[in-house]
Image (spheres, helix red, strand yellow):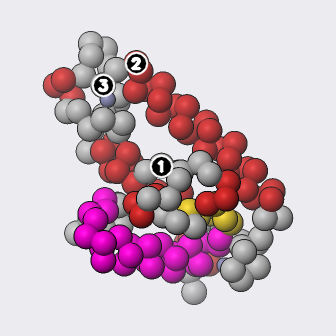
């Protein structure tokens, strides 16, 4: 069972478009993918103030949305009813064209159900010929 380890794993899909996290990890501007050499003066993580703000706003927005969805779903996984290691899932995945902050496209899943669902989303994306960048997909 993966019980206690599941809380430790950062859920990259749940927070941002996957490629944002991926870019940030690579030292690129998460929002536009610029390399550090092209960053504005004094900018380290983001290429410019505007993108730093955009990232921050997205993060803030997500936290609010996340809380709302958890409340709406009564802090239960909608698939199995678990109350452990809850995460927010995009019913129609972002990579498959689903809206990121649309409440109708969001549901509460436990980590286990989320992993299973994400695998299905990845399959769907691959079958449509789309590339998906996630930390998990890295060799
Ligand atoms: Zn940028
Ligand atoms: Zn579940």
Between discs 3 and 1, the one toward the N terminus: 1
Q: Give percent across and percent down for residue 37.
A: 16, 25
Q: Which mark is residue 104?
A: none
Q: Secondary structure at mark 2?
A: helix
- Residue drawn at 21 percent across, 29 percent down: 36
- Residue drawn at 23 percent across, 33 percent down: 34
Categorize mark 1 by other alpha carbons within 10 Å: few (<14), some (14-19), many (20+). Answer: some
Spatial separation of the CA atoms under disc 1 and disc 2: 19 Å
Tell me the quadrant of the picture where the C terminus can be found.
bottom left
- On whether residue 85 falls in the magenta region, the answer is no
- Residue drawn at 38 percent across, 45 percent down: 20
Categorize mark 2 by other alpha carbons within 10 Å: few (<14), some (14-19), many (20+). Answer: few
Residue 65 in view here: yes
* Residue lying at the far left of the rendered structure: 37
On the rendering, which quadrant does ligand 2 occupy?
A: bottom right
**Which segment is the magenta one?**
109-133
Tell me the quadrant of the picture where the N terminus can be found.
bottom right
- On whether residue 132 falls in the magenta region, the answer is yes
Disc 2 designates what residue?
49
């Amino acid at each position: 069972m993966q019980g206690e380890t599941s809380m430790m794993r950062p859920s990259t899909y749940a927070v941002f478009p996957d490629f944002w996290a991926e870019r940030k990890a690579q030292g690129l501007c998460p929002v536009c993918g610029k390399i550090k050499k092209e960053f504005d003066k004094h900018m380290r993580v983001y290429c410019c103030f505007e993108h730093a703000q955009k990232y921050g706003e997205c993060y803030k927005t997500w936290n609010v949305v996340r809380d709302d969805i958890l409340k709406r779903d009564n802090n239960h996984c909608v698939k199995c009813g678990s109350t452990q290691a809850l995460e927010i899932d995009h019913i129609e995945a972002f990579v498959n064209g689903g809206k990121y902050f649309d409440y109708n496209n969001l549901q509460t899943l436990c980590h286990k159900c989320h992993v299973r669902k994400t695998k299905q989303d990845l399959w769907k994306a691959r079958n449509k010929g789309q590339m998906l960048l996630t930390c998990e997909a890295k060799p």
